[in-house]
Image: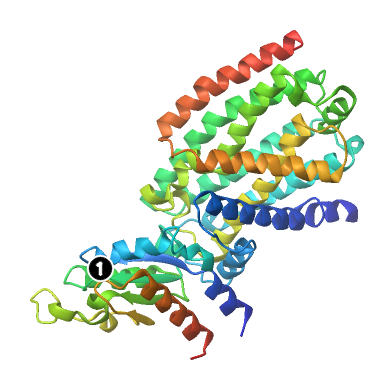
Amino acid sequence: MSLKINALTKSLWVFHAACSPCNNCDIEILDVLTPRFDAERFGIVLVGSVRHADVLLVTGVPNMKTKDTIKALHAQAPKPCLVVAVGGCACGRVMFRDSYNSPCDLDEIIPVDAYIPGCPPKPEAILAGVIKLINKVKGKE
Amino acid sequence: MIRNLFDFLVFPGFLTAIFVGLLTGGIDRVVTARIQWRKGPPLFQNFIDIIKLSAKEIIIPAGARFTFLLSPFFGLLAVSLAAAIIGRALINPLESFLGDVIVILYLLGIPAIALIIGASSSRNPLASVGASREMKLMLAYELPFIISLITVIVKSKGALHLGSIINYQVNNGANLYSFSGALAFICMLLCAHAKLGFVPFDVAEAEQEIMAGAMIEYSGLALALFKLTKAVLLYLLPLFLIGLFWFTNANLFVFIGKFLVIIVLFVLIKNTNPRLRIDQAIKFFWGPVTICALAGLGLAILGY
């Protein structure tokens, strides 16, 4: 395992890309950063600019407007950039599947590396998902 | 020649400054986490961040000028040189050259200017807001910074060598232990805090407000260079403060203790204050801080 991958997995800077969510997933993501769960233990910090990001945390169903925005955001992030879909909406559109304003799934727009289902997922589930993502990047099951 | 290069690149200069600065940044993050009742990142997190950033892609925004990638180097070179000069003067006070205090004063201004140039050449509107704020903040803190420096020069009988200021303190007691010295120290500590861009004065990089402000378009190695500049500043500003105000003997352990006390002061100010608006920051520096600095200068001229 190279130094590059090792450093990447120990310092994931997260950009929170809200793709028209209902805010429940966003609140749970903020819970992960609170003193009780403290994601900074693993070097995870929330950054403001997408140019600094290593991970795009996407919440919500892509709609007609945000599907172009999320594609542009992914193009603006420096590579290697990982994508995590948080919540049932971002994973598979759940009850919005037949909505007039829901053109496609998230993984039809950008490649998704990890899915964290739940409505909303608990903070423990989000941390478990991040660990699965790290293991996937390191190339072990 | 080789000795000067070694000074600049390895021992008091570049490599030592980066190592100590990043480690101090790690201490800062851990202490901040403990204050907020968290566990916090590992001590060497900042090193991992730098390694990761240097392996990432560098994106140059469309239409950016060539100064976009040049300006991070200016800042880092200037602060490394300042670190080498200050380190040399602290190790051997007799070796410093005439007017090195003034040279250091100018070199300490360069990282902010580099940030302003880099941000304005990125063609991002939020970056230009950050650059204009950084410029205003710089105008605000340079005035009390220079007045405090003049106070120290007056107190040590007009010495313009950092070395002779240190020698004067070794012979006559530290500048900090007098009224004028203490006032100037407090003013310079606040100005150093603003130079570091720590929380009450982080208007230029306000994460929640203008995303990353001046740094918004930087990615990969260019961003890492700015982080390294901040790390070297975090190493050399406490050294500069100790050299000007608090140098009594050359005992290494006492010296490290003083360094840590100043770092703890920085961390405490950072964690107990919310961010000021830019107009509040300018009023603060041109109002109370400048008045304190002028009072210190007056007391120093009167001999207190």
Q: Residues within 10 Å of mark 1 (few under 14, many from 20)?
A: many
Colouring chosen for the image of the structure? rainbow
In the image, taking residue A126 as reference, residue B143 lies left or right, namely right
Q: Chain of mark 1?
A: A
Residue name at image x 74 percent, y 19 percent:
B178
Question: x, y percentage for residue B144?
Answer: 60, 25
Question: x, y percentage for residue B246?
Answer: 77, 32
Residue name at image x 43 percent, y 47 percent:
B206
Question: x, y percentage for residue B151?
Answer: 71, 20
Q: Nearer the viewer, residue A34 or B298?
A: A34
Q: Which picture quadrant has residue A61?
A: bottom left
In the image, taking residue B240 as reference, residue A68 lies left or right, namely left
For disc 1, the marked residue is: A19
- Position of residue B173 relative to residue A95, above or below, is above
In the image, taking residue B170 as reference, residue B8 lies left or right, namely left
- Farthest residue toward the bottom? A141
Q: Nearer the viewer, residue A24 or B52?
A: A24
- Position of residue B22 relative to residue B277, above or below, is below
Q: Quadrant of the C terminus of chain B?
A: top right
In the image, taking residue B110 as reference, residue A119 lies left or right, namely left
Q: Is residue B74 visible?
A: no
- Which structural element holds mark 1? loop
Q: Given the image, on which type of amino acid does mark 1 rest? A: Cys
